Image (cartoon, rainbow, N blue to C red):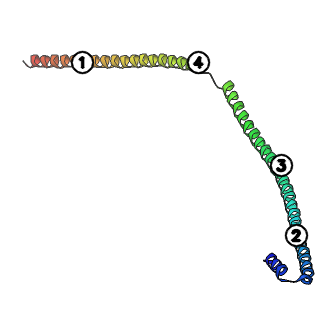
Amino acid sequence: MKLLILISALILCPMPALAQVDQIARAEIEHIKALMLAADKRYEQRFDSQEKAVINALAAQKELSFTTAADAKEAVNKAQQATEKRFDSVNEFRAQLKDQQTTFMSRAEVEQRMKALTDVVALLQQRVDKTEGQGTGAANLWALIVGALGLLFGAVGLYLAFSRRGEMRRAQA
């Protein structure tokens, strides 16, 4: 727009006004230079602030990575300690199993002792059966003897009773 005004002023204005137009053009050029310097200054300030922001961001990232690395190292150390504790308890359990293995009897030894005990129980059962059989036989013998004696005494008693009765009948007759 200003250029249009400048051109129209050149065409319409006489020569002395040309000096005035020249002065206006120079002022306009100075104004444009001032605007460009101001824009350059703003761009330089933006660049400086962006550069500072990038430097600050990189420093923060570096600090964060150091912190993250330290945290990761600490986490690894804790995990290793937990693993060592777990392995200690596993080793303790293994030691218990080994102690049990050495103090407990083996299966073969248990089976051998059980067979020996079973044989002893069978032998004792045979003796008890034999003793019971002898006791039963002796009791039966005594019952037979008592029964036989009772029968004998009964027969003798009957004989005596009938023989006395017969004597009494003869004596009465």
Give coordinates of residue 28: x percent, y percent.
Answer: 88, 76
Q: Count residues near mark 2 (Cα–Cα under 10 Å), then give few for <14, some for 14-19, many for 20+.
A: few
Residue highlighted by disc 3: 70
Residue highlighted by disc 4: 108
Circles 4 and 1: CB distance less than 8 Å? no
Q: Could you tell me how far apart the alpha carbons at marks 1 and 2 are, in whole angstroms?
A: 159 Å
Whether residue 106 is situated above or below residue 63 in the rendered picture: above
Q: Count residues near mark 3 (Cα–Cα under 10 Å), then give few for <14, some for 14-19, many for 20+.
A: few
Mark 4 vs 1, N-terminal side: 4
Give coordinates of residue 11: x percent, y percent.
Answer: 82, 79
Give coordinates of residue 118: x percent, y percent.
Answer: 50, 19
Mark 1 vs 3, N-terminal side: 3
Q: Amino acid at mark 3?
A: Ala
| In the image: residue 120, left or right of residue 142 | right
Q: Could you tell me how far apart the alpha carbons at marks 2 and 4 are, in whole angstroms?
A: 105 Å
Residue highlighted by disc 2: 36
Q: Could you tell me how far apart the alpha carbons at marks 4 and 1 are, in whole angstroms?
A: 63 Å
| In the image: residue 25, left or right of residue 135 | right
Residue at screen point 87% across, 64% down: 49
How many circles with numbers are drawn on the protein? 4
Circle 4 SS class: helix
| In the image: residue 102, left or right of residue 172 | right
Q: Quadrant of the N terminus?
A: bottom right
Q: Nearer the viewer, mark 3 or mark 2?
A: 2
